[in-house]
């Protein structure tokens, strides 16, 4: 019986599904000892800091992660950063395989004038801010304006627009960061535009997200019927299933009786952002459209146009991803998830993606190295292990119970670390 040591860098969905796929490949000849390293004091990646707080069902996948973590051959090393103190090369010397699962955390930029004005920000800052990510607690979100613009036609743009357009008391029973809930409650924003550069037939939203919009209890959702009719014609007689499903969902929104709530979320199609204008801060977005230039006055602009991966020293990156062939990076180093394929797909997509990479790892295995592990490399770092994380988790859930929320997240690193001492 051979035991192989595998280290996974990044405790998000891609990392956990890689661990699960390794477990599934154990047999009478081989087992895997898995060490998972996470930069933050808490695991779960985008399930904690990306998924919208009003989508608690999506977060139930965390139960799967905790089941994987309960395996006696699994160890969590949270609050440990790879790249500076400990390098990927050092890990590759010690482990039989290194799996990079660090995702894509940097927001893509539009590259248009005015993008850096105060009041213009990326969803890559806004989303972790409302989700209590420690590195984004101090992001300055000023919602003292009446109109917000969200640029992009994907599910992240949809999450951001919905969070801005909701009646904030709807967020009371969620795990939205307390600091963000305060800002949402004081928000003056009543009109939220979500702008797509192409037509409805090309939108990257998925239809369940569109279909839930009419269920918003305090928000009018407006899609121009002519935009959808024109898109249906352009899509032709046999559109792809997902396109048809999206167009059906948009048609039903466009044809619905108008409501008269105080808050409105409005879709703009075929609006390509050209410039963000303002003297001291954002005042408007100028778009080019098929019928000419259109100016939308607003006080905040959030771009949600995709992500690229943040680099790790010693690993080559290109086009926002780790350079790889089907997940193979070099020697015994591999990559899974968004760092491998780019920021596409839902959480579950990582399951099959990881399984295929684990098959390659198995093909490539040499006899076990037995050359130590990360414990030999960690010196004075304050490591949070699985039991430390369980204490954080239990404390957050208990704090939530008192307020009718799934949890109250601690935000600061120091607070999170203190919870491990309880
Ligand atoms: P996405 O789905 O790739 O959408 C990006 C959007 O940005 C597209 O509409 C794209 O338009 C637009 N865009 C790109 N460059 C642009 C530019 N220069 N100017 C204007 N628009 C531009 O990315 P995402 O929304 O970040 O989502 C990432 C992944 O996470 C997706 O697979 C998504 O489904 C998933 N996700 C899922 C959920 C959920 O299941 N509830 C929630 C959040 C995210 P073009 O098509 O014209 O390029």
Image (cartoon, rainbow, N blue to C red):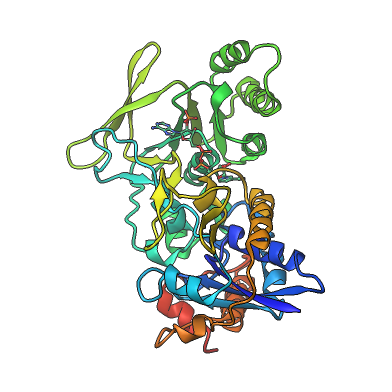
In this rendering, the answer to whether 411 lies above or below 322 is below
In this rendering, the answer to whether 413 lies above or below 203 is below
Please indicate whether residue 23 sits to the left or right of residue 55 in the image.
Answer: right
Please state which of residues 400 and 291 is positioned toward the viewer in this rendering: 291
Please state which of residues 237 and 180 is positioned toward the viewer in this rendering: 237
The x and y percentages for residue 163 are: 50, 47
Please indicate whether residue 354 sits to the left or right of residue 162 in the image.
Answer: right
In this rendering, the answer to whether 68 lies above or below 285 is below
The x and y percentages for residue 215 are: 66, 39
Q: Residue at x 40, y 54 (%)?
A: 316
The residue sitting at the front extreme is 367
- The quarter in which the C terminus is drawn is bottom right
In this rendering, the answer to whether 345 lies above or below 251 is below
- The quarter in which the N terminus is drawn is bottom right
Q: Please say whether residue 191 is visible from this viewpoint.
A: yes
Please state which of residues 316 and 375 is positioned toward the viewer in this rendering: 316
Please indicate whether residue 9 sits to the left or right of residue 316 in the image.
Answer: right
Please state which of residues 110 and 127 is positioned toward the viewer in this rendering: 110
The x and y percentages for residue 295 are: 31, 23
The residue sitting at the right extreme is 28
Please indicate whether residue 319 sits to the left or right of residue 221 in the image.
Answer: left
The x and y percentages for residue 318 are: 40, 46
Q: Residue at x 62, y 36 (%)?
A: 206
The residue sitting at the left extreme is 279
Q: Please say whether residue 186 is visible from this viewpoint.
A: no
Q: How many marks?
A: 0
Q: Residue at x 52, y 77 (%)?
A: 94
Instruction: Classify residue 332 by image quadrant.
Output: bottom right
């Amino acid at each position: 019986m051979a035991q192989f040591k595998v280290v996974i860098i990044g405790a998000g969905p891609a990392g956990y599904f890689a661990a699960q796929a390794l477990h599934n490949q154990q047999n009478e000849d081989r087992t895997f000892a898995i060490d998972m390293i996470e930069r933050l004091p808490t695991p779960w990646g985008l399930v904690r800091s990306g998924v919208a707080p009003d989508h608690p069902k999506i977060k139930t996948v965390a139960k799967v992660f905790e089941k994987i973590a309960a395996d006696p051959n699994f160890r969590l090393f949270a609050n440990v950063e790879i790249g500076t103190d400990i390098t990927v090369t050092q890990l590759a010397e010690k482990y039989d395989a290194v799996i990079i699962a660090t995702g894509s955390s940097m927001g893509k930029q539009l590259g248009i004038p005015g993008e850096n004005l105060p009041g213009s920000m990326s969803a890559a800052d806004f989303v972790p801010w409302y989700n209590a990510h420690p590195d984004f607690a101090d992001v300055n979100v000023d919602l003292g304006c009446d109109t917000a613009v969200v640029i992009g036609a994907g599910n992240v743009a949809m999450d951001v627009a919905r969070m801005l357009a909701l009646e904030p008391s709807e967020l009371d029973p969620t795990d939205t960061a307390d600091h963000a809930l305060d800002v949402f409650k004081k928000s003056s924003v009543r009109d939220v535009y979500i702008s797509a550069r192409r037509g409805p037939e090309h939108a990257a939203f998925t239809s369940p997200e569109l279909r839930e919009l009419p269920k918003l209890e305090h928000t009018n959702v407006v899609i121009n019927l002519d935009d959808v009719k024109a898109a249906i014609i352009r899509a032709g007689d046999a559109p792809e299933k997902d396109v048809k499903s999206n167009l059906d969902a948009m048609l039903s929104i466009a044809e619905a009786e108008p409501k008269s709530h105080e808050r409105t979320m409005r879709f703009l199609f075929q609006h390509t952002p050209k410039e963000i204008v303002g003297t001291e801060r954002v005042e408007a977005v100028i778009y080019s459209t098929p019928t000419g230039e259109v100016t939308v006055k607003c006080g905040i602009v959030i771009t949600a146009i995709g992500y690229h991966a943040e680099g790790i020293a010693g690993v080559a990156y290109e086009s926002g991803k780790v350079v790889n062939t089907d997940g193979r990076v070099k020697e015994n180093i591999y990559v899974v998830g968004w760092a491998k394929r780019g920021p596409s797909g839902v959480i579950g997509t990582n399951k099959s993606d990881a399984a295929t990479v684990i098959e390659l790892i198995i093909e490539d295995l040499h006899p076990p190295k037995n050359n130590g592990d990360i414990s030999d490399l960690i010196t004075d770092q304050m490591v949070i292990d699985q039991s430390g994380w369980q204490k954080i988790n239990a404390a957050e859930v208990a704090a939530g119970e008192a307020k009718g929320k799934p949890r109250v997240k601690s935000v600061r690193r120091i607070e999170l670390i203190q919870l491990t001492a309880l």
